[in-house]
Image: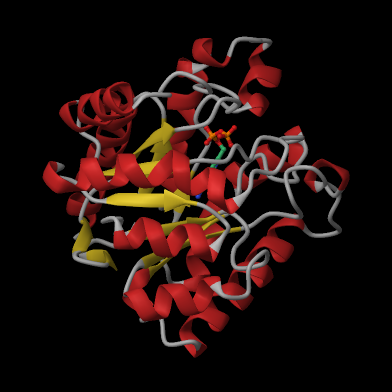
Amino acid sequence: MDVGGRMEGRNATLILDRPRIMGILNLTPDSFSDGGRYDSLDVALARAYQMVDEGADLIDIGGESTRPGAAPVSAEEEIRRVVPVIEALTRQCPVPVSIDTTKSSVARLAIEAGASFINDVSGLLFDHQMVGCAAETGAGLFLMHTSGTPLTMQQHTRYPDLLGEIISRLRAGVGQALNAGVPRSHLAIDPGIGFGKTLEGNLEILRRLSELRCLGFPILLGTSRKSFIGKMLGIENPEDRLCGSLATVALGVAAGASIFRVHDVRQSREAALMAWGVIQEGQQRKS
Ligand code: HH2
């Protein structure tokens, strides 16, 4: 992680002088871990404020599940789910909001409602107007690697060179964003854990995560409660995957990731800051 780095969004800046926590708020009936939990405005806002109290630096709001096999949702339905919550939350919330969507029409209305960042799990692949939306609105943009839509991505999990493919796809995405006028300081990258990858592929990404630093952008890591942790540890229920999730956060900090997308905010923040403290001390001794 580059000390002194930052990621800017519309009316917001994430100072990356230590690991930052992105708290997950899925306003969906079918997300793999928290689907159906936050289906009223009050419950969703209460969960967002709870994550802020627990130390979240950013709240990521999504209205469409991206788990493998998830059915697509219309833009109208996504907007109906996310916009009222973003509007109400950003009126008072002390931390910024990102909109987790692959649709520019949803992103645009979410930003009008107060969101500062776009989290595009397709890395600009699904909607060619997304890049213009980021450039015009001044939103920050998280670009993630995937191999296809949630319906098809698990059919494309074999790569001759997995890290090479991720890096070249992310390089193309950031190039496209820079060409469209999105400033460098508004971009971050994400290898897309669980998106068109096998168990071995996800482990390889974690082992070789530091290689993504060659692109020179902040790295976001989203491992929280994912099925590769369940497969490794033989744990069926996503809510029981906390310990495995925390191990990946610590490894991510050591590899140079600076933003962690998580369900368990307090625990992940503590794991990240502990790992960060160990690394910092080592760095101070070297200098
Ligand atoms: N993972 C999920 C969704 N959005 N965004 C980024 N940048 N990185 C990720 O790894 C990532 C993401 C999937 O997890 P979740 O939102 O918890 O579940 P679902 O897609 O079922 O809503």
Give 84 or 127, whichever is nearer the viewer.
Answer: 84
- Left/right placement of residue 119 relative to residue 110 reads right
Q: Which image quarter: residue 182?
A: bottom left
Give 12 or 44, whichever is nearer the viewer.
Answer: 44
Q: Please name the residue shown 75% across and 36% down the image.
A: 200
Q: Please name the residue shown 46% across and 17% down the image.
A: 242
Q: Is residue 253 visible?
A: no
Q: Which image quarter: residue 41?
A: top left
The correct choice, above or below, for 170 with respect to 43 in the image is below
Quarter of the image containing the N terminus? bottom left
Name the spot of residue 79 as percent of width and height, x first: 47, 48
Give 111 or 69, whichever is nearer the viewer.
Answer: 111
Q: Which image quarter: residue 33?
A: top right
The correct choice, above or below, for 77 with respect to 267 in the image is below
Name the spot of residue 216 as percent of width and height, x first: 43, 72
Q: Please name the residue shown 86% across and 58% down the image.
A: 160
The colouring scheme, among rainbow, by chain, secondary structure or one colour, is: secondary structure
Name the spot of residue 272 as percent of width and height, x first: 32, 35
Q: Please name the residue shown 74% across and 33% down the image.
A: 199
Quarter of the image containing the C terminus? bottom left
The correct choice, above or below, for 223 with respect to 205 in the image is above
Q: Quadrant of ligand 1?
A: top right
- Left/right placement of residue 133 relative to residue 112 reads right
Q: Is residue 157 visible?
A: yes
Name the spot of residue 146 as percent of width and height, x first: 68, 54
The number of numbered badges drawn on the structure is 0
